[in-house]
Amino acid sequence: MNRVNNLNLCSFDAVIAGAGLSGITAARVLAEAGHKVVVVEKREEVGGNTYDYVDGNGITVQKYGPHIFHTSDKEVFDFLSRFTEWTAYEHRVLGNINGKLVPVPFNLTSLFELYGKEEGGKIKDILIEEIGLGKKVPILTLKGHADKAVRDFADFVYRNVFYIYTMKQWGFKPEELGEAVMNRVPVYISYEDRYFTDTYQYMPADGFTEMSKNILDHENITLITGVDILEHIEIAGGKIFADGKEFCGKLIYTGRTEQLFGYKFGKLSYRSLDFVFETLDTPSYQPAAVVNYNTSEKFTRISEFTKFACGKKDKTVIVKEYSKDFKEGDIPYYPIPKRENYEEYLKYAEEAAKVPNLILLGRLAAYKYINMDVAVKNAICAANNIK
Ligand code: UDP
């Protein structure tokens, strides 16, 4: 990997805007195919919002909030495995529901904890009869079930697990968001207590930042940090201009598309977060790596970083997440997954489609609430299409 101070973007086959997982994956695939690529990143760090660092107590802290890797996609897993060793890690979350800690996704254990043995047993039998043991059901599907007892149970789960948390996280009710959001955390008609049921569940042994640096470590990749690509790139008449000269290579852009097009169709909506970190003088703060606050508090969840890794420490680090409306200058962590927002985005996507050498990639540029593995997959596919 080379580092340069002055840009000469036209000397590269591809310019990649953004060193998040999408950008660096595309860079690596192109570099291995023989393309000379430059990755231009606004921050001084790589890895995008997966960026992590080891603090003074030897604890790996994720600066932009908890990122837990999981995938069922072998191609993605094999690709990343070339750049990191893994630590096996199965994510389990507890929800604080009216002061009781129960598994989330809501499962049969949660049911018994909150309803008691007798009532819980009756509901369990109905759920197994009506839905089937081992099934995973989105809450909104459960709410519309034909059987009244199932619907009553669904209303309880909706109010106590989803409604308040979702209002805190998005400022919208669950049914106002795209279905896919609630489908991420279905109700489990089983005792499964893992947050994810993917085939591969691991954390990079030396952290995401080390993995990202390894991905970038290729002779055909030049990395420029601390530079905002938008100060160098312009789109006009279906063409890309880099520092005033027409750029005929590929531009893989992973930032906010509306910025690339000078907000010509207006701003898009995002949700941002405030993180409050605390280092505590105790080896363990809470009984799970993540505790969701489903019925109380202003923050949505507390993550405890020492629980993502093996090995005991004397101290621990926790982070509370406060979700907020995005304003210019904030970090746009989440596109807001509502149909009307995506329709606004499509105006930009149509504009982008008129630029033959422009590719939009990643959570921001594609305006999609995707996980890390999907970001990597999409980047591999996009780069392969260029070859
Ligand atoms: N959700 C909820 N209660 C929970 C967990 C999740 O209402 O205890 C909803 C909430 O709307 C959240 C969405 O499900 O934004 C997706 O949750 P996930 O944990 O996947 O969110 P992420 O980790 O991506 O922020």
Image (tube, rainbow, N blue to C red):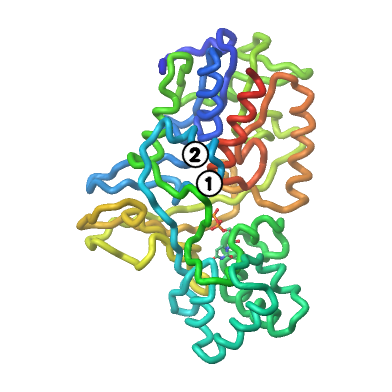
- Label tally: 2
Tell me the quarter of the image containing the N terminus: top left
Residue 84 lies, in percent from the top left, at 38, 35
Residue 118 lies, in percent from the top left, at 53, 91
Which badge, 2 or 1, comes first in the chain's sequence?
Answer: 1
Label 2 vs label 1: CA separation?
7 Å
| Residues packed near mark 1 inside 10 Å, few (<14), some (14 to 19) or many (20 plus) | some
**Mark 1 is on which residue type?**
Thr
| Residues packed near mark 2 inside 10 Å, few (<14), some (14 to 19) or many (20 plus) | many
The residue singled out by tag 1 in the image is 71
Q: Is mark 2 within 8 Å of ligand 1?
A: no
The residue tagged with tag 2: helix, strand or loop? helix
Residue contact at pointers 2 and 1, CB within 8 angstroms: yes
Say which quarter of the image contains residue 251.
top right
Could you say which is closer to the camera, residue 240 or residue 136?
Answer: 136
Say which quarter of the image contains residue 219.
top left
Residue 306 lies, in percent from the top left, at 31, 54
Above or below, 9 against 144 in this view is above
Above or below, 78 against 17 in this view is below
Q: Is mark 1 within 8 Å of ligand 1?
A: no
**Mark 2 is on which residue type?**
Phe
Q: Which residue is pictured at 64% across the width and 35% down the height? A: 365
Q: Ligand 1 sits in which quadrant?
A: bottom right
Above or below, 203 against 210 in this view is below
Tell me the quarter of the image containing the C terminus: top right
Q: Which mark is residue 77?
A: 2
Say which quarter of the image contains residue 152.
bottom right
